Amino acid sequence: MTATTSAAPVTAQSALRATMRRRTRRSVVVTGALATTAAALFVLTMMVGSYGLGAVEVVASVLHLRDDPSVDFIVRDLRLPTASTAMAVGLALGASGTIFQQLLRNPLASPDFIGITSGAGLTAVSGIVLLQVGGLAVSGLALGGAVLAALLMYVLAWRDGVSGYRFILIGIGVTVFFDGLIGYLLTRAQLFEARQAVRWLTGSIGQASAAELGLLLVALVVLLPAALLLQRQLRALELGDDTARALGSRTELSRAGLLATAVVLVALAVSVAGPILFVALVAGPVADRLLGPAAGSVLAAALAGAALLLTADLVALHVLPAPLPTGVVTGAVGAPYLLWLLATTNRRGAGG
């Protein structure tokens, strides 16, 4: 009897270790596959165009392995900035989107719909229409608007802590309010400013300057590792505040740190490329579907976001009859996904 009793915990521990090993192995394989896919799309983006190049030529030029002035001009000066912007913006949107979804415990909790992107859009359009500014000034205004919108929602949602459901509802209300103000500004604008504002609001990869891209890349180097370090706290908060406290997590401090990381990532992405919709919404669920039981990886979601945005940019520039802003493609693909998500979420009763 004693031998049977003692054997049971050993068997359970062995099964748990085997399950953890399988999940870890699947996570490594999926993350590696997503990284390989994103890297391949990054190279492919620089291969296609009016002057086609081979993969070897592109890689050699990017890594400075070969000196060919004509190829170097096409790759480094013309195509590398666009490809780098798509990669960086995709990484930022994918990581921030999954942090919001896990932190607020709702698949609809994307920065596209809870006021942050609209806050950036309002300040950017205000700068274009009222101040007649452009370039880096518009990006700075968008960055400030996104951060201020996030702070406003955090303050409005605070009731002895921040509830995910309340945060989302307030975010939707703030989005509607900001979008109304954006519409009003567009009706007051001159034709040139209105066109410039609408183009920015559509979202386009090719409009970033070197300074804007450099700032986003520096932020990714700092904030992506920070998000990975906070991932343990994120998974604890997914279980609920009481459970997280029982596990030793300082819930409000952890939540504030995670929100700040996600907000800065999405704010910088929007300031660089404009409000490219649905990438932040879709990247996390795509990564989770591939990861299976090992779902919830911020790195996998970031890589999925990069792969999605690089694909959308390729389609927008080279597949359609005429080149279009990247945001048009992500909107066309993301809108049906949103409708499907709303329908399935309501059927499961997980809407709140």
Image (tube, helix red, strand yellow):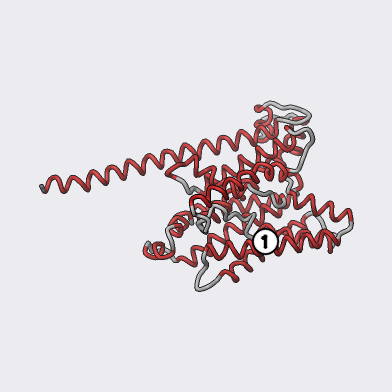
- Say whether residue 141 is visible: no
Is residue 243 shown left or right of residue 82? Answer: left
**Residue shown at the point (49%, 47%) measured from the top left:** 297
In the rendered view, would you say 11 is above or below 222? above
The percent position of residue 248, horizontal first and vertical second, equals 39, 64
Q: Report whether 277 appears left or right of 298.
A: right
Q: Is residue 341 left or right of residue 70?
A: left
* Of the pair 38 and 157, the residue shown nearer to us: 157
Residue 221 point in image, percent of width and height: 59, 51
In the rendered image, which residue does mark 1 sit on? 175
For the image, the number of numbered tags is: 1
Residue at the extreme front of the image, as rendered: 347
Image quarter of residue 122: bottom right
Tell me what residue is drawn at x 89 percent, y 54 percent: 191
Residue sitting at the far bottom: 160
Residue at screen point 46% across, 65% down:
251
Position of residue 179 in the picture relative to residue 97 (left or right): right
Estimate the x, y position of residue 324 in percent, counting from the top left: 77, 40
| Vertical placement of residue 234 versus 37, above or below | below
Please provide percent x and percent y for residue 12.
26, 46
Query: Residue type at mark 1?
Result: Thr
SS under mark 1: helix
Q: Residues within 10 Å of mark 1 (few under 14, many from 20)?
A: many
Report if residue 246 is visible in the image: yes
Nearer to the camera, 248 or 1: 1
